[in-house]
Amino acid sequence: MLHSLESAGSGLLLAFSFDIENVSPQRLVLITVLNTIFTVALCSRLFYSLELERGLRPALANALQKLPFVSSYVHRLQRKVVTELEGEKGGRNRSKIRTTLPQTGLSFDALLAKCERLKQEAPSLHTERMSGAIYVSPASEAFKLCTSIYSMFAHTNPLHGDAFPTICAMEADVVSFVACLLGAKNDDDVCGNLTSGGTESILSAIRTSRDYMRATRGINKPEMIAAVSAHAAIYKAAEYFNIKLMLIGTDEQGRLNISELKRKMNKNVILVYASAPGYPHGVIDSVEAIASCVRLWGCCLHVDACLGGFVLPFAGSASGKVSPYPKYHFEVPEVTSMSIDTHKYGCAQKGSSVILYRNRQIRKFQYTAVSSWTGGMYISPSQAGSRSGGIIAQTWAIMMYFGHAGYSRQANTILQASASLRRSIADISPLELIGEDVTMVVAWRSASKEVDIYVLNDILAEMGWHLSVLHSPPALHMCITSANIPSLQSLVVDLHEAVGRVKSGDFEVKNAKAPIYGMANRMSDTNIVNDLLKDIQDVMDK
């Protein structure tokens, strides 16, 4: 296509070789129009090819990547990383993966015994040394309760509400429980549904907002605005639902930059995305300030409280603040939707989240209704069709088990542990905390080139820690849960030792990831890193 455009352009340029005085006005207008069309088409092609909308730096990096010698070098690096990863996986190779069903089915007892062996063969998970991931101890009564309740309702399906009314009633209860925690009053119209996780809740909110704004405001070229710290699910939503994503920076405390938001707002914005708190640094965006910007344009405002939904409502007294955090939920009138993970600090098992909407008028745009299908009339309230009622039942059960007092105790314990960890890390030079909000996430970076944060992570990993590795700026974080609180003092001790080893150069780490993380941080938002991530995922899925 580009070649044909260049040929056309050459022909048009030749047209200007004529003496302009001898060219008729009609022909001159035609030549001008054609040259304009050619220039616009060429610029558009270059803009699309170089992905300039992502910024100049990634565009230049992607252009360089297309050069033969650069492409060859990058490919060799990618293959080196992937080959090393395949070697690390070792035992989990294709020869150990079954490709066909057994000719004769295994017995009940045989399968139980086999699964027990597989469980024992799996790498031991030191849940007390993991950031997030495990939010309730597998040895706890709460964990056992969820497992038991799930099995009782595993084969029910809320899609068939007439056949399984109990499950539908449980789902309604859960939605009401969560809504009441997040600013909804008894006479409010706040409503919602359970989803499979935070990503589905976020996708549902964004797609629903897009369709709502198209129907009520006639917006056909939707855009949404989010901080660079917003959850990565926004990229999926932009890609899936053909929405232009505009990322803006953060202020000194890591919150969405309000001044930049004001400059970016326009008539095509369907939604502004806020975090309470954000995953990387545990920082709570200024929802009320964002709401004042949204109010002027009449677009939707989504608050991602996937992490904070079962902690922030109790954060005032636990964090030592005189007053609670600034409003972040439905008490702010401009908030139109919220996402909350019940499988995090709600302590339900994985596959459980809640999406809430300001009212039923907005939620209707989440539904899919089909009246012309040959299979009959079809209505689906969420992206998933069939869902296991077991997930809903165990979520309902765990919320009834904890109650308001139980969640309050958990939140207080977590936030007190967070405050203590923040004080300890602040005393370790040259580490410095990111953000001032006391939440479940404690993030830190290195203030000195003498201590490479990614090398520090490699040493801590050899000590058995599984921390979250961050970019822009390079940093680490610990997401505090009930499962890892007992180990936090050990983390402080190991941090002191690891920092000392990095400073002295007294370390040798096998399977070091620091070079990979360093490259990814320097070349973030480029196709080079994106392609490498896809290659790594492909290895993991083998």
Image: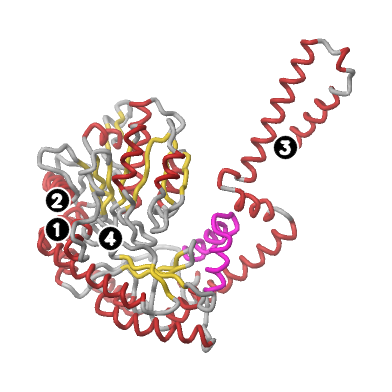
Depth-wise, is mark 3 or mark 4 nearer the camera? 3
The answer to the question of whether label 3 and label 4 lie on touching residues, with beta carbons closer than 8 A, is no
- Residue 446 screen position, x and y as percent: 47, 73
Q: Which mark is residue 399?
A: 1
Task: Write down the region rendered in magenta.
Answer: 514-542
Specify the amino acid type for callout 3.
Leu
In the rendered image, residue 370 lying in the magenta stretch gets the answer no
The answer to the question of whether label 1 and label 2 lie on touching residues, with beta carbons closer than 8 A, is yes
Label 3, on which residue? 2
Q: Nearer the viewer, residue 45 or 286?
A: 286
Specify the amino acid type for callout 2.
Phe
Specify the amino acid type for callout 1.
Met
Q: Is residue 316 above or below residue 288?
A: below
Q: Which mark is residue 350?
A: 4
Quadrant location of the N terminus?
Answer: top right
Q: CA distance from mark 2 to mark 4?
A: 19 Å
Specify the amino acid type for callout 4.
Lys
Query: Which of pointers 2 and 4 lies earlier in the amino acid sequence?
Result: 2
Kindly tell me whether residue 167 is visible in this rendering: no
Label 2, on which residue? 177
Q: Is residue 342 above or below residue 219?
A: below
- Residue 234 screen position, x and y as percent: 41, 48
